[in-house]
Image (cartoon, rainbow, N blue to C red):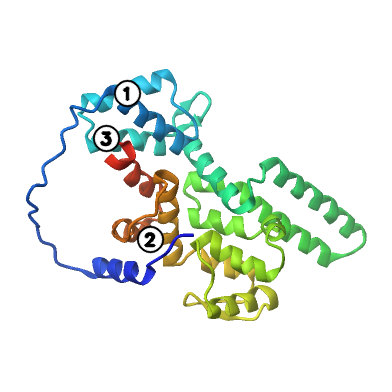
Amino acid sequence: MFKFTLPITLIAVAGLLSCNKSEDILISGNTPPDYRSVPTIKVENYVNRYFIDLLGREPTDTERVYHTALLKRNKLSLAARDTLINILLYDTSYHIGDSSYRHACMQRIYDLSKARFLEGAGDDDIAQFIGNLEFSITISRLNGDSVGVFAAKAEQKKYRDVLQSKWKYRKGIATYSNMCEAMLNNSIYDQINMNSFNYVNASFDDLFQRQPLKDEFSASYDIIDKNIPRQIFGRWAANKNEYCDVLTHTPEFYEAQIRWIYYLLLQREAKTQEVINLLGNYIRTENMQEVQKAIVKTDEYAQFR
């Protein structure tokens, strides 16, 4: 479980965002590193690593040769790393096996998120649930049960929101917050975390890597179990839909995602300053790929030092 220092990061980011003055700061001894001694095998390992982490597969021989040569030709500069990582994150041109790099990148995030929230439930399983509900709708209509029809259609929409979240995220129609919201708000997540007590605790743990405080739990439980309007994270919610929306659009959510990506890519907790460096821009843009790139570009990730 990660230990958060949210008040510190939020205060720091607020200070950064509100600052109107800028000044140049001279730091002595800040000379660019010399990468000439980095062996080719290390560069190839770096290429292999970011292909696996960003696309979920190893590079082809052609891709490995191209990326390695470009990095070495540009002396492993941050600009060269930025260029190559941008290709994997944003290129929409067709590639055999991937459809596009952008598609593969979004599929990777989607698969990781399903493993995180839904125990890796397959899309075929989700589609089957939608089909089963269609049968229930037919039976309810035959019985004149309009309430049953409405309830089944609402459940179908929640499943479709999960399946469509990858496509919407890739197209820029939705954000990663919306994908997580869909992952929380469906019957699969409900079945994994049965009853309101477990649901509240699980949603905090999955989103924030912590358990709710006493007041947070009390408010959340009233919202989920009793549909009583309560204020949480400075916003009001009166049902599960509103609860999921609130939790996935808070500053703490964005901080938690930065920490999650750090752990996925570096297998360590992010330092407070590292979170501060990325949090303001992530809150403004909701572009998680820029968080990935910021980490993958580093010498620590590349293991060049």
Q: Mark 2 points at which residue?
A: 283
What residue is rendered at 51% in x and 23% in y? 96
The amino acid at mark 3 is: Phe
Amino acid at the residue labelled 1: Ile
- Relative to 271, residue 200 above or below: below
Residue annotated with mark 1:
41
Q: Quadrant of residue 206?
A: bottom right
Residue that label 3 marks: 304
Q: Is residue 111 visible?
A: yes
Q: Do the residues labelled 1 and 3 touch (CB within 8 Å)?
A: no
Work out whether residue 94 or residue 232 is closer to the camera in this orientation and state it.
Answer: 232
The quadrant of the image that shows the C terminus is: top left
Q: Could you tell me how far apart the alpha carbons at marks 1 and 2 are, in whole angstroms? A: 37 Å
Badge 2 or badge 3: first in the primary sequence? 2
Secondary structure of the residue carrying tag 3 is loop
1 or 2: tag closer to the N-terminus: 1
Q: How far apart are marks 2 and 3 (CA)?
A: 30 Å
